[in-house]
Amino acid sequence: MMRLTYTLSRIAPAPFLLAAILLGLPACSGDGCPTCVDGVDPERLIDPLTLGDGSGYPGASWAVAPDPKLLGWSQKRLDTATDYAESLGSDGLMVVDRGVVVLEHGRTSRNLIVQSCRKSFLSALYGIYYDQGLIDLDATMEELGIDDLPPTLTPQEKQATVEQLLMARSGVYHEAAAESQSMKDARPPRYSHAPGTFWYYNNWDFNVLGTLFIQLTGKDIFQALYDDVALPLQMQEFQPGNGSYYYQAMSEHPAYHFSMSPRDMARFGLLVLRAGRWRSGQIFPESWVDRILTSYSDAGSTWDYGYMWWVGDPQAWGGHTVYAARGGGGQAIFVVEDMEVVITHKVDNDTWTRGWSQVNQLVAMILDAKVF
């Protein structure tokens, strides 16, 4: 699978552009500009590498565009998207273009539960330790000693592999912790599909992957997420104490829930966009990013499924290449590869009453705001 390669090249802005930035002047001279779109002049765009420290990555804090128009964004359309997010009750929204913030709305430093986005983070951790030789994707549940509470796994179910769990294709339809009602309703009958033959969004697979990560690496999930991802990415809010294991009576394998802020989630999204690379270091292999973002199953509703990442149908996203980590009814990281854009969206479950159709509409409005 071909991945977009991000090349860092610093281009100094012309003096009049620097003056425009410093003086806060608009990027477009007015209605007389024949090439302008919504006040954005394509002749006055700047390279985002002229902002921040010039690396294309955030440091202790994010670089913020002095005027989104200078990076090709319509302020009018961004304002419309922000108003829509406000009407939905979004708690935090962040838009990053080539490593620079062009929109920040709501409480972007607030830690809220990521819900099922947890799975996409674990997928990244698997890539780190797979690269170290600690994880065998072909190992079976039988070989790894994995079982569950009665009714226990059958010999056929125990032939499911680690990779099949990452794909949500284990064929094990045991009850699992932290299942939503829709997941329970959609769960196939037990023993109805052999391992590897059928896709079902299966919390049993995802939770067992948490158990296996601890077993195979000897590391706590939340500490590993902090040590291996949060620290090198200079996340601003995340700490190991943000996570906890959630057990329920039907299974011995807990869910691994944690909270994170939209601006920290955006760093993770940028890491995926940059194929696992952060500044001069490779956090997880580029080949692993190819694996997690490859479509293995049709997941319905214009989405395919990779290794615990959602792979968008370009026809549903205006021809754009979109990948997503999604949780609950609105927690999300959208990685728009061809535009080099990351969008994070967080909701407070105590007040949020909307769903994915509204979140998707918000994302579409944001993408439409990029006019150059």
Image (cartoon, rainbow, N blue to C red):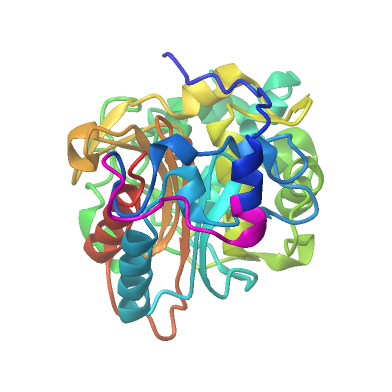
Q: Check if residue 23 falls in the magenta segment.
A: yes
Res 151 visible:
no
Residue located farthest toward the front when viewing the structure as drawn = 32
Task: Give the quadrant of residue 183.
Answer: bottom left
Task: Give the quadrant of residue 358.
Answer: bottom left
Viewer-side residue, 83 vs 282: 83
Q: Is residue 348 left or right of residue 15?
A: left
**Quarter containing the N terminus:** top left
Percent across and percent down for residue 109 are 65, 70
Q: Is residue 1 above or below residue 6?
A: above
Viewer-side residue, 163 vs 139: 163
Q: Which residues are magenta?
A: 20-34
Q: Is residue 34 above or below residue 344?
A: above
**Quarter containing the C terminus:** top left
**Residue at point 29%, 39% (across, down):** 35
**Residue at point 35%, 54% (across, down):** 39
Q: Is residue 148 left or right of residue 310?
A: right
Percent across and percent down for residue 233 are 74, 44
**Residue at point 58%, 26% (across, down):** 275
